[in-house]
Image (cartoon, helix red, strand yellow):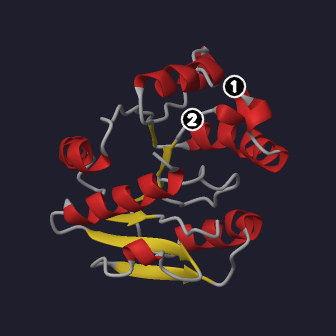
Amino acid sequence: MGMLTVAVELSKALVAARDGDAITLLCSRERPPALAGLDCEAVLAPYRHEVVLKARWLPMIETQVGADAILYPYWPSPPRRRPGAPPAAVYVHDLAFRLRPAEVPWQQRLYMGTVMGQALRSAGAVLVPSETTRRDVLAAYPLPSSPRDSARPRRRATYRSGSSPGSSWPSALSSRARTTPASWRRTAACAASPSW
């Protein structure tokens, strides 16, 4: 399943399972066509370029949308986030840029290699599509274990989905909603654009 498909279907599932929560899509200049009719607010970026979006626009907008959490279903969260930014849930599709570098363009290897570690360290939750990806992520980016690191606890969760977003995500989202802190009442979903 492709990255865009996951981002679109997960955004749709969040809106369908929102149970009164507000969802805001953060989009690159326009809503992706697959999310055009989705019943939620959308904030459109004035930029298309990935580096400008991650380095400039997303860190600024994260603190302005009034969200209690932000989902990054396409790429990792911005490498530098502002103080007061809501917790980020990062969806890691795979670690091909590390495990099979010959199959990944050098630009993507460079970008992902630069931002992935920081995104995972600062994430409120880490979502993965399979047990294999979960093992890969934990092997490449181990959880903090030293006393110094454990003095600053971070929330980190892994998630194993089924093979079909439509079949497993709504129930996973419902169970996630039951374990989400009561203060997380507004969620912003960061939707992907085909141009990203």
Front residue of 36 and 141 = 36
- State whether residue 4 is above or below residue 159: below
Residue at the image point whose x is 60% and y is 20% from the top: 142
The residue wearing badge 1 is 99
Residue type, label 2: Asp
Residue at the image point whose x is 69% and y is 79% from the top: 47
Front residue of 133 and 155 = 133
Where residue 195 appears, as percent x and y from the top left, is: 64, 70
The residue wearing badge 2 is 94
Residue type, label 1: Leu
Mark 2 crowd level (few <14, some 14–19, many ≥20, 10 Å Cα): some
Residue at the image point whose x is 57% and y is 35% from the top: 94
- State whether residue 97 is above or below residue 21: above
* Element marked by disc 1: helix
Q: Are marks 1 and 2 in contact (CB under 8 Å)?
A: yes
Where residue 164 appears, as percent x and y from the top left, is: 30, 43
**Left or right position of 72 against 166:** right
**Left or right position of 47 against 1:** right
Q: Which quadrant of the figure contains the N terminus? A: top left
Mark 1 crowd level (few <14, some 14–19, many ≥20, 10 Å Cα): few
Where residue 173 appears, as percent x and y from the top left, is: 24, 48
Where residue 45 appears, as percent x and y from the top left, is: 60, 80
Taking the image as drawn, is residue 185 in sight? no
Q: Which quadrant of the figure contains the C terminus? A: bottom right
* Element marked by disc 2: loop
